[in-house]
């Protein structure tokens, strides 16, 4: 049972109008029952990013991922096609593959049951005397997978709608800001452990009301007056339309650019960044790792397999400055929302939807409330 302390204020309604609305109540970030419900109602019904096709160049290449407790794998077969499956042996439930690599066949480390790259059961030892045994019954269970601009997504919902329908317009937006998107490869990966609920990290990404206070170098790098957030059905865009400052304190911007900074949020837990400078795109993803813990992963992509000097400078800024700033903010908020004195705030939203407006956070929280349907 979720007990409400007398000092906690009565929960105010979440309104469809962000200028009228209170924020999501603290329980959405502190209630273990809600955290568990998010598995089935959000993460097991959504498209989730797990990698890029450049990581699976050859037949037999595979990657694995965890979707809030559900292990999956994606494998390239001999025909060059990508297939996704639950990463579990149908014999006794052992995990089949770990990490990433290449395999001619998928062999269970427990009892050596063997499957081909398309998930078909091939053989198992000592099965000759089993009655009514069907090979087909023990094929690997498939998972929906799609490539979106070369990025690999999976969805555990067998009836999932196509990504181009759910995120209509996003593909064209990203192609506009990264015209060389079909040439990119993953060049860098980093993990960040954060002592905060995953939704707090998404909330933080979706507004720049805090930027002047907490991100002095980012404000110096990006033209904030032209920074604009727009919300759509299942994503939002966050773009500074004027070129960035070449001599910023953050890092030296190289290469011509007609805009300053472009980013997007893809429901439920992915943020996409295009930093000022040479062609690049990065995926910063918030993985729930417990009620008040989150694992953030950063995949940086650029042209070729090696980081350019400009990309190295941008990553150094992200790793050493911007990420520590944001992580500190979110961990502090996690402590604050557990306070008996806090339950809800108000969204700060202006008519112009300026760079100081929090309507992007309202959009995300509305999606969370609709998905969980707790009222």
Image (cartoon, helix red, strand yellow):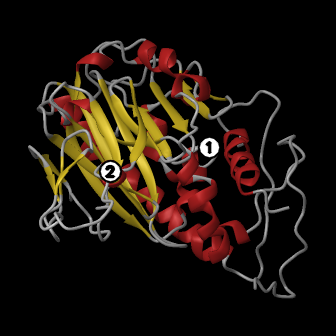
* Frontmost residue, 115 versus 62: 115
| Horizontal arrangement in the rendering, residue 131 relative to residue 148 (left or right) | left
Compared to residue 204, the image places residue 17 above or below, namely above
Residue 53 appears anywhere in the view: yes
The answer, for residue 31, to whether it is visible in the render is no
Using the image, tell me which numbered label, if any, was put on residue 140: 2
Residue 103 position within the rendered picture, expressed as x and y whole percent measured from the top left: 10, 46
Secondary structure category for the residue under label 1: loop
Q: What residue lies at 35% left-to-right and 36% top-to-bottom?
A: 282
Q: Position of residue 21 (x, y in %)?
A: 86, 50
* Residues at marks 2 and 1 touching, judged by CB atoms closer than 8 Å: no
Between 271 and 308, the one nearer to me in the picture: 271
Q: Quadrant of residue 30?
A: bottom right
Lateral position of residue 212 relative to residue 274, left or right: right
Q: Residue at x 28, y 21 (%)?
A: 279
Q: Is residue 225 left or right of residue 139?
A: right
């Amino acid at each position: 049972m979720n007990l409400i302390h007398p000092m906690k204020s009565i929960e105010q309604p979440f309104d469809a109008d962000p200028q009228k609305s209170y924020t999501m109540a603290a329980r959405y970030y502190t209630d273990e029952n809600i955290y568990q419900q998010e598995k089935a109602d959000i993460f097991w019904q959504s498209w989730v990013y797990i990698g890029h096709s450049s990581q699976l160049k050859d037949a037999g290449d595979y990657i694995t991922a965890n979707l809030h407790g559900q292990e999956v794998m994606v494998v390239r077969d001999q025909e060059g096609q990508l297939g996704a499956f639950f990463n579990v042996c149908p014999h006794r439930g052992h995990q089949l593959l770990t990490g990433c690599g290449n395999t001619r066949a998928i062999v269970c480390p427990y009892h050596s049951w063997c499957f081909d790259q398309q998930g078909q059961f091939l053989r198992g030892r000592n099965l000759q005397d089993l009655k009514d045994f069907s090979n087909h019954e023990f094929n690997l269970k498939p998972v929906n997978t799609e490539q979106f601009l070369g990025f690999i997504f999976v969805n555990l919902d067998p009836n999932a709608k196509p990504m181009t329908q759910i995120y209509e317009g996003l593909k064209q937006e990203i192609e506009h800001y990264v015209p060389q998107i079909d040439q990119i490869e993953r060049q860098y990966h980093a993990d960040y452990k954060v002592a905060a609920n995953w939704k707090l990290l998404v909330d933080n990404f979706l507004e720049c009301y805090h930027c002047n206070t907490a991100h002095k170098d980012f404000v110096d790098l990006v033209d904030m007056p032209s920074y604009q957030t727009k919300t759509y059905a299942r994503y939002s865009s966050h773009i500074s339309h004027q070129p960035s400052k070449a001599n910023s304190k953050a890092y030296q911007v190289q290469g011509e650019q007609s805009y300053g900074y472009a980013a997007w949020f893809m429901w439920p837990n992915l943020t996409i960044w295009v930093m000022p400078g040479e062609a690049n795109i990065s995926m910063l993803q918030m993985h729930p790792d417990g009620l008040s813990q989150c694992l953030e992963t950063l995949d940086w992509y650029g042209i070729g397999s090696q980081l350019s000097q400009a990309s190295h400078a941008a990553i150094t800024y992200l790793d050493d400055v911007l990420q520590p700033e944001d992580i500190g903010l979110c961990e502090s908020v996690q402590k604050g929302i557990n306070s008996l004195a806090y339950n809800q705030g108000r969204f700060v939203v202006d008519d112009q939807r300026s760079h100081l407006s929090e309507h992007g956070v309202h959009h995300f929280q509305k999606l969370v409330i609709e998905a969980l349907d707790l009222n």
